[in-house]
Amino acid sequence: MWIYEKKLQYPVKIRKPNARLAKAIISQYGGPDGELGASLRYLSQRYSMPYKEVKGALTDIGTEELAHLEMVGSIIHQLTRDLSPEEVVAQGFDDYFVDHTTGVYPQTASGTPYTTAFLQVKGDPITDLHEDMAAEMKARTTYDNILRISDDPDVNDVIRFLRQREIVHYQRFGELLQIVTDRMNSKNFFAINPSFDL
């Protein structure tokens, strides 16, 4: 179990609305490499993880990703609140607005709704941890792309924090992969696996 503190992991205080930027950032809410998929991936993978400390890390990181989802949602909300209909149209937000007004809806920057097809859970510890490392680097790249197009210092401050957490998670998953690989090698899992090799 975990304790929920009713505050964001990092403060989000966006002063200037910018719906065009929100439309790009929403990919980290519900896109293929976003925070929703990351949290579901890790919290689902933990069930088949055979090692207690790795299972615990998946739970911790998956829970942290939920906190990141809340931060990204806060960015999007603050970038789109109090827009006039003219601003919605001028900032290219009208197609989103028609379906969702300014509600925070999980989708990609191009408008595809979130789908669990964005994530993978294989049930094999080594495969899943490789998937997790790749997922963290894809999320980091998405944050890099947001920083390339954003000129809002309030947004960029939070995005840099989130980007750094992706790097920390990547490193942590690398450490966990080493633990799992060492344990499986000690059983000659890769050399001879009686389940598969006759």
Image: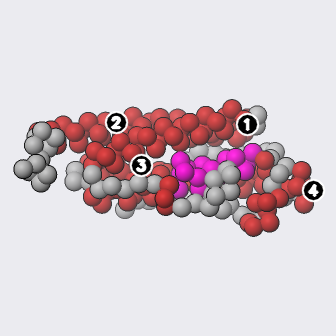
From the image, tell me which residue sits under label 1: 150
**Alpha carbon distance from label 2 to label 1:** 30 Å
Q: What's under tag 3, amino acid-wise?
A: Ile
Label disc, if present, on residue 86 of the rendered structure: 4
For label 4, the SS is: helix
Residue 15 in view: yes
**Alpha carbon distance from label 3 to label 1:** 27 Å
- Circle 3/circle 4 CB separation < 8 Å: no
Q: Measuring 12% from the left and 39% from the top, which residue is drawn there? A: 191
Label disc, if present, on residue 174 of the rendered structure: 2
Q: Which of the two residues, 164 or 197, is positioned nearer the viewer here?
A: 197
Indicate which label's residue lies in the foreground, 3 or 4. 4
**Alpha carbon distance from label 2 to label 4:** 48 Å
Q: Measuring 10% from the left and 43% from the top, which residue is drawn there? A: 192
**Alpha carbon distance from label 4 to label 1:** 22 Å
Q: Which residues are magenta?
A: 21-37
